[in-house]
Image (cartoon, helix red, strand yellow):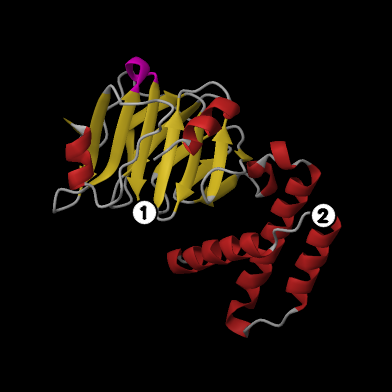
């Protein structure tokens, strides 16, 4: 499958996910069957059937246990959503001292807001950040990533421009959907390695590090990642306070 086909498949999966928001499991199955029964153009038929099957698997897991759906199990160990790629696979050794993100620099909050091409927000529940970092700027100096650090650096709030696949590449044992946070959200409760994929799609293995519990969500065309809060309840409360 080409990269273009892959991106079209991802778009179809997102469309299917939005189309099948039905409260009862039986109705979900009926909706999937009805979608499968519709004719599709010949050149897109194989990809369409694959989209429908994956959507049906995700819906089946959600119907069984909406609050604790193991998302990765539903899609065979790989899920890309909103610029995040989650993989259920072993990972190699992590660097003893991880490198910072590309061209990372400290800045003030006002400076970050002036330079970023997207609205830089702050969680009201956390207040003013201890530090602000900008990373991976474009040719005009606009950072791709803005990071706010709290509680001596133990809590990290990353904001990154767009929904590029992928931005942060994670290896994680499981993930679960979260409702009521942004447009779409995933919670990773267990510690997991994280490494950065830059603007050119190059995986920065030297940035790999062990990350704590993380909540990842998108709102509009911006993706957010909140790391370091121990429970989903606290992370969700902080996420909802973003202004």
* Res 20 quadrant in image: bottom right
* Res 52 quadrant in image: bottom right
Of callouts 2 and 1, the N-terminal one: 2
Between residues 72 and 16, which one lies in front from this camera angle?
16
Q: Are marks 2 and 1 in contact (CB under 8 Å)?
A: no
Q: Which mark is residue 24?
A: 2
Q: Position of residue 138 (x, y in %)?
A: 19, 51
Secondary structure mainly formed by the magenta segment? helix
Up-down relation of residue 203 to residue 34 (above or below): above
Tell me, yes or no, whether the highlighted magenta stretch contains residue 153: yes
* Local secondary structure at mark 2: loop
| Residue topped by disc 1 | 162
Q: Position of residue 230 (x, y in %)?
A: 54, 21
Q: Residue at x 83, y 66 (%)?
A: 30
Task: Name the side, left or right, on which 136 lies relative to 65.
Answer: left
Q: Residue furthest left?
A: 140
Tell me, yes or no, whether the highlighted magenta stretch contains residue 176: no
Q: Residue at x 36, y 53 (%)?
A: 162
Task: Name the side, left or right, on which 16 lies relative to 165.
Answer: right
**Crowd tier of the residue under label 1, counting other residues whose Cα lies within 10 Å: few below 14, some 14–19, many 20 or above:** some
Of the residues tagged 2 and 1, which is closer to the observer?
Answer: 2
Magenta highlight range: 150-154
Task: Name the side, left or right, on which 72 lies relative to 125.
Answer: right
Q: Position of residue 193 (x, y in %)?
A: 46, 29
Q: Residue at x 30, y 43 (%)?
A: 120
Task: Name the side, left or right, on which 102 lies relative to 195.
Answer: left
Between residues 136 and 153, which one lies in front from this camera angle?
153
């Amino acid at each position: 499958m080409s990269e273009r086909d892959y991106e079209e498949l991802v778009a179809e999966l997102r469309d299917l996910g939005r189309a099948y928001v039905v409260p009862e499991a039986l109705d979900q199955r009926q909706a999937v069957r009805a979608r499968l029964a519709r004719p599709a153009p010949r050149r897109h038929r194989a990809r369409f059937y694959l989209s429908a099957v994956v959507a049906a698997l995700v819906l089946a897991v959600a119907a069984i246990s909406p609050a604790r759906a193991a998302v990765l199990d539903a899609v065979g160990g790989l899920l890309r959503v909103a610029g995040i790629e989650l993989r259920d696979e072993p990972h190699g050794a992590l660097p003893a001292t991880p490198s910072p993100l590309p061209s990372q620099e400290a800045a003030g909050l006002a400076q970050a807001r002036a330079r970023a091409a997207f609205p830089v927000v702050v969680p009201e529940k956390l207040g003013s950040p201890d530090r602000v970092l900008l990373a991976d700027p474009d040719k005009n100096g606009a950072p791709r990533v803005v990071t706010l650090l709290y509680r001596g650096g133990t809590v990290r709030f990353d904001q990154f421009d767009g929904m590029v696949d992928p931005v942060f590449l994670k290896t994680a044992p499981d993930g679960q959907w979260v409702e009521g946070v942004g447009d779409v959200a995933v919670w990773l409760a267990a510690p997991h390695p994280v490494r950065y994929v830059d603007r050119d799609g190059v995986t920065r293995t030297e940035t790999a590090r062990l990350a704590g519990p993380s909540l990842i969500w998108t709102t509009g065309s911006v993706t957010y990642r909140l790391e370091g809060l121990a429970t989903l309840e606290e992370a969700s409360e902080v996420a909802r306070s973003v202004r």
